[in-house]
Image (tube, coloured by chain):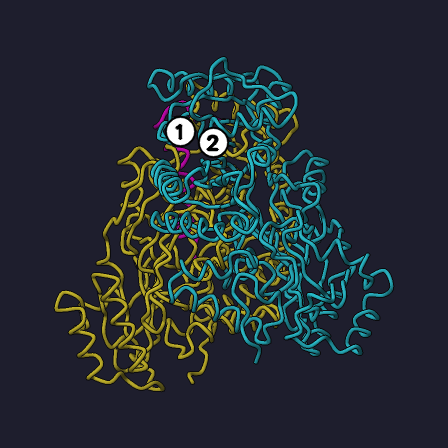
Chain colours: A yellow, B cyan
Amino acid sequence: MTASRDTSRPLPDPAALARLKETVGPAGFLDLPGDTDPFLTSFGGTFRGEAALVLRPASTGEVARAVAICAEARIPMVPQGGNTGLAGGAQPDRSGSSVLISLDRMRRVRAVDRHNDTLTLEAGVTLADAQAEAERIDRLFPLSLASEGSCRIGGNLATNAGGTQVLRYGNMRALTLGLEVVLPDGRIWDGLRALRKDNAGYDLKQVFIGSEGTLGIITAAVLRLFPRPRAVATAMAAIPDVPAAIRLLGLARERLGEHLSAFELMRASSLDHAIAAVPGLASPFSSRHAWYLLVEASGQEAGNTLGTALEAVLEAGLEDGLVADAVIAASHEQRQRLWKLREAQAEAQKHAGRGVKHDISVPVSVIPDFIARADAALTAAFPGIEPFTFGHVGDGNLHYNPIVPADWSDGEWRQKSAEINRLVHDVVAEFGGSISAEHGLGQLRASEAERYKSAVELDLMRTLKQVLDPLGLMNPGKVLRDIPRE
Amino acid sequence: MTASRDTSRPLPDPAALARLKETVGPAGFLDLPGDTDPFLTSFGGTFRGEAALVLRPASTGEVARAVAICAEARIPMVPQGGNTGLAGGAQPDRSGSSVLISLDRMRRVRAVDRHNDTLTLEAGVTLADAQAEAERIDRLFPLSLASEGSCRIGGNLATNAGGTQVLRYGNMRALTLGLEVVLPDGRIWDGLRALRKDNAGYDLKQVFIGSEGTLGIITAAVLRLFPRPRAVATAMAAIPDVPAAIRLLGLARERLGEHLSAFELMRASSLDHAIAAVPGLASPFSSRHAWYLLVEASGQEAGNTLGTALEAVLEAGLEDGLVADAVIAASHEQRQRLWKLREAQAEAQKHAGRGVKHDISVPVSVIPDFIARADAALTAAFPGIEPFTFGHVGDGNLHYNPIVPADWSDGEWRQKSAEINRLVHDVVAEFGGSISAEHGLGQLRASEAERYKSAVELDLMRTLKQVLDPLGLMNPGKVLRDIPRE
């Protein structure tokens, strides 16, 4: 490891490290390479950094004292939740000058308020545990992600996590009423209000949500709960083209309103790869179609009201030529089988070959144009590239991950990946879209974002960073490229 | 007016005023007292200020140029929308040193995107016009306020407006996807993105929404649209006490889910006063009850599904002793009659006497305790005071406006109003509530807020203000007390 250490930054003062260890006690830190490794390497191994110490504070007070020591000793800090991020937001750089602060021991449920429909949780609670806590009082915490067993509430907040239920319930931001944050100087901001309406001053929590740990460390939050849906109706529709998806979405929203909870698009080839990659998967249709949609609605209705409404949507779609074929799940097991086809997209992608990932969003109305334009530009520029697309089309969010030709070497793939990113993101920008819909910028897209943001916007972002973290110690190099320290 | 002018601040440089007039042209300014009066006096006449000039720019470019001139000449600016605010947020101070910038001529609809379910509007579009624009494409823009005919989108954004549909659709913040803002130095930030998911950097729009014009001037926004509900079911329930309201809310949320669109509480005496004040109003019940609830659900369902579900909620409430009596509107006309009882609360209040207003929120679960504690404290401290309470109990938001004894003199009322505010807001704070749920702080509550916010929170707010508006020219004295200029 030492071989690759970036020596441009000074290693922390050993006395400060000793004080940090003392602050959190023997259970609160790791400093042996074997122990720290899982924290320093990202999920999937894409990002890897070095740290002088991994801290695992057990309370907000410990976080605050640790941050104050780091600030005093000018030690960069990298906050980490479940380490499931895809943009390298929770990995330090390779200098070894940082302290990684994991919130994974802060797992207390501070309050459960059934009549207010709120949970107050510490940052280290996993998303799955938050969901279970809600279920215990017959409520729903709707955030749902592939990594929900490992990702943590603090990370979900820091990245404004999305997932499969955004269409109905919104992003993490929309699910949050209050925050507790340790500021970059070690002060604690207690904004743990459990209020649905509060216009008494600036809404400071909004500044920290989605800031990827660059403005402070979120230590606890008040989250909104919802009634648990009593009924769910799930269908898969085969559609002729992407414009049909957008028109069917309009129909579905009109008939199902906010009941519509998932509207997920897949290419024919994505489905083929999923079926080839995962044993036991099968297409629910007798013939192959160009595109598929997974459509789901959920609600409180007794009986089959929702199923009937969803059927009516699909029938109207068939009549209008928007739907070529459709199946509605008649049982929980059938429902799960349809979802498996969507959930297997990650495996499908691996089966298809090596991909170049994009987590983009555009206005829903221009999704067809975006796909057409990006497909055409890519296949013209990179012969043999295979479009691979799935995602939350109801939110305008696509995982647009073209598969590169099998004969590309590692070096070719690395070099051309940047060119492919540029090409796809330029098309995104033309359509007024975002180059990071739900994964955040992290270290992966911090410089790329500079190309697409206006000078005014970058200046506002840097101004916020500068004033809230004047020493530039809080997760440096993430979201914004590293700002030189004072 | 000159008699009461506060002379502690210098009047603007006449040359700068001339440049401002030139920038906006003859149709873009008013400087005669008779013409400027409607802009300088708040709705209801509570707040009154002076201005050197009222500007009415017609475009974002004109706003930007005017702001740049004001910044250069160190002239304070007071942005104004429909001038319907209740906290004096759109009135200048009495020094006459400011320029008032009304957005009322910026009324363009910039884009309508039916498939993306978005409207892009300029700040001066009235809320009613925004609703009509949505209706034109068979969509709903759900924000709904008493002042919707006059209030403007820019003001709704600046105050993060609430109203009667928050329970189902959220505050103005939740309805906003993008913003265009003129910054205090005259630069334009174009954040008019029409995306439901965008995690590429800090979500800057959140900083400006709800900041009451103290950080910049919002000139345009992208707003979310929803399907127009096809069915609505409305009921009024008589309930024995406030805890019953909270338990019935739980039942309603479980059965109706997000269909529940209104859950409004009124005291028996409030209803009595409304009926006495407004000709033609009548109680729908044969006997008098302690409290009343207006409950409404809306959705896409065909037939009477919603009505049946609402009836089931009320029946369950009757069985559990939560409901003493209930009526469900059988026609549009009956529905409107029930709503009139709720909408007449402002007149009811005037009929009851002189009140002291509070726009507070607490966690929904502690509403009964809050009302009990505040009622007891008030009647103990001020014999003869009459509790008067109505509001959006489903959001934890009450307009808690006790009526003072008829024999209090004007002077007594003014002096004791401050004591009553203090007493009520101290109870709010004990319950973790907010002293401004939906009206904002404006100039009315800026100093009061200092009592209830932590030093860290006030410091963060001042830091944001200082860095985004270093000259302290943007709506000074609102939200935060005036910061001395550099």
Q: CA distance from mark 2 to mark 1?
A: 8 Å
Q: Is residue A384 visible?
A: no
**Subunit under mark 2:** B
User: Is residue A271 or residue A197 the one in the foreground?
Assistant: A197
Q: Chain of mark 1?
A: B
Which numbered disc covers residue B245?
Answer: 1
Judge left or right: residue B381 versus residue A315. left
**Numbered disc total:** 2
Q: Which disc, if any, is residue B148?
A: none
Task: List the residue tagged with mark 2.
Answer: B265
Give the residue displayed 39% in from the left and 55% down from the top.
A157
- Amino acid tagged 1: Ala
Which amino acid does the dot numbered 2 rest on? Leu
* Circle 1 Cα neighbour tier, 10 Å, few/some/many (<14 / 14–19 / ≥20): many
Camera sees residue B216? yes
Q: Quick check: A166 above or below B10?
A: above
Label 2 neighbourhood size at 10 Å, few (<14), some (14-19), many (20+)?
many
Residue B369: x, y in percent? 33, 38
Quadrant where the N terminus of chain B lies?
bottom right
Q: Which residues are magenta?
A: A327-355
Is residue B306 or residue A125 the one in the foreground? B306
| Residue A341, image x, y percentages | 41, 39
Quarter holding residue A106: bottom left
Please, what secondary structure does the residue beneath circle 1 have? helix
